[in-house]
Amino acid sequence: MKTDGYNAGEHFDEMFTSEGEIRPHYEGFFNFLDKASTKKMKHLQHSANKTQLAMGMTFNVYHDNQGMEKILHLDIIPRIISNQEWKKLEAGLKQRVYALNLFLQDIYNDQKILKDGIVPAELILKSKDYLKPCIGLTPPKGIWCHITGTDLIRDKNGEYYILEDNLRCPSGVSYMLESREIIKRVYPDLFIKKGVMPVSDYPAKLLKMLQNISGKAKPVVGVLTPGIYNSAYFEHSYLALQMGVELVSGVDLIVENKKVYMQTTKGLQQIDVIYRRIDDTFLDPTVFNPASMLGVPGIFEAYKAGNIGLANAPGTGVADDKAVYAYVPKIIKYYLDEEPILNNVPTYLCREEEDRKYVLDNIHNLVVKETNAAGGYGMLIGPKSTKEEHEHFKTLIKNNPTNYIAQPTLSLSTVPSLTEEGVEGRHVDLRPYILYGEDIEVIPGALTRVALKKGSLVVNSSQGGGSKDTWVLYN
């Protein structure tokens, strides 16, 4: 399929240099693409779409009035990352997760970083995600963030930046795994020739990490889901099946004598570790949100007593607040006495008077985000928005400055993608997954999210984004 006339514009393109040369780690795939006919590529894409539907790789969009399940469109042209590039990403992500874990342990216990004025105390202590019932707690083995999905982007110079940390219930890993299975069928020979690192052992590694939380030799593990109407239910059921553990909802669990039991056809069975896929405040209605119908009354007391392990630990959400994000470089320096290997996107905190004035004066050039929003909601992309939208967000910022941050509009990198018009560049981000068990391990692959609309920078699936398989090479 010819790529003549392909133009990445001013963006960094993952396959082509600015002079139109093929980057070395893409050469093998480009040779295949160059020889393949348009008809063949479209046939392969159609087959991939049908396979996704057959596998049930769908999600619900809460704000979609149609209320229908959709597939996360998988573009069959992969994103390829060289081994040298990956090693830097791996080191930077391990450093970041380690520091954030120390930060969480500190703010719920000694609060040294707050007393030393490195992070403003009121930013943490007044945050709705700082859970007072967790004060004084140390999770099993001192690990708070067992599973992290960190979002990165690449600017026009090819430099990687951390966009945000997802430490609560990061989603999308099932799409990374299933997408790989589909794309291996699309290009069976290329995987061997290119030397692509596997991701299929993720469920085994996840299970080992979860078992590590418990002190028992053979702990019983379960995945706690909000239920079939949750947008990520496919992932919850998929991971439970792949790990060979129980998929449970709140109604399946009961607490007696500060121990958690599953109700089974053979009676009650104690459960030792729960991979929770519900938000902190819905976990236990007797401690957090009393209106929660999703959680388990008494589970927090069982947790405090050391009778149940939870991943991720309750209270982690405060560390991925978008305002706290701005302080992560200082957090790394404070706990590790190291400079960050991967940089943050420059961030303006609207809670700070000087930053707020800059944001209000330059809102047309900035991306403005709600500190607690996710999924691409509560966001303004200044250059792509109207004057009315600018004014609306200015009012929101003035009324509640603590709730907003702003960042420059970075030019996300592009990857050639299959469109109706042929091969065209589409903007992407990158979400690698990190497991923290006996060691910190970065899975050698990632969910690459792609903005399907031409020129769009919004990659979120809830906002019409799609995905690509991510190949990390051995050499």
Image (cartoon, rainbow, N blue to C red):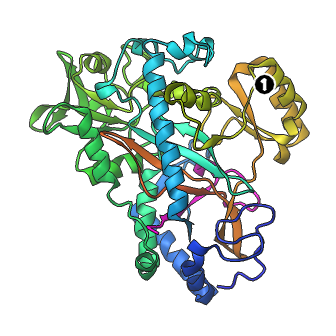
Quadrant where the image shows the N terminus: bottom right
Q: Nearer the viewer, residue 297 or 104?
A: 104
Q: Which residue bears the numbered disc 1?
A: 396
417 on left or right of 220: right
Q: Is residue 281 at least partly visible in the picture? A: no
Residue beneath the point at 30% across and 50% down: 205
Residue 3 location, quadrant: bottom right
Horizontal side of 208 relative to 40 (left or right) equals left
Q: Is residue 310 above or below residue 448?
A: above
Question: In this picture, is 148 found above or below 157?
Answer: above
Q: Is residue 464 rendered magenta in the image? A: yes
**In magenta segment, residue 254:** no
* Residue 471 x, y percent position in the rendering: 49, 65
Residue at 39% over, 32% down: 312
292 up-or-down from 64: above or below: above
Q: Quadrant of residue 22?
A: bottom right
* Rendered location of residue 21, percent (x, y): 71, 77
Locate residue 393, reporting x and y percent. Answer: 81, 30
Q: Is mark 1 on a helix, strand or loop?
A: helix
State the image quarter where residue 288 is shown. Answer: top left
In magenta, the rendered stretch is 452-475
Closer to us: 109 or 451: 109
Residue visible at 53% across and 76% down in the picture: 46
Q: Can residue 189 be seen in this view?
A: yes
Q: Would you call the spot at circle 1 few (<14 residues within 10 Å), some (14-19), or many (20 or more)? A: some
> In this rendering, would 55 be left or right of 267?
right
Relative side of 365 to 97, left or right: right
The image shows residue 417, relative to residue 359, as above or below, that is below
Between 94 and 196, the residue placed more toward the observer is 94
Horizontal and vertical percent position of residue 262: 20, 32
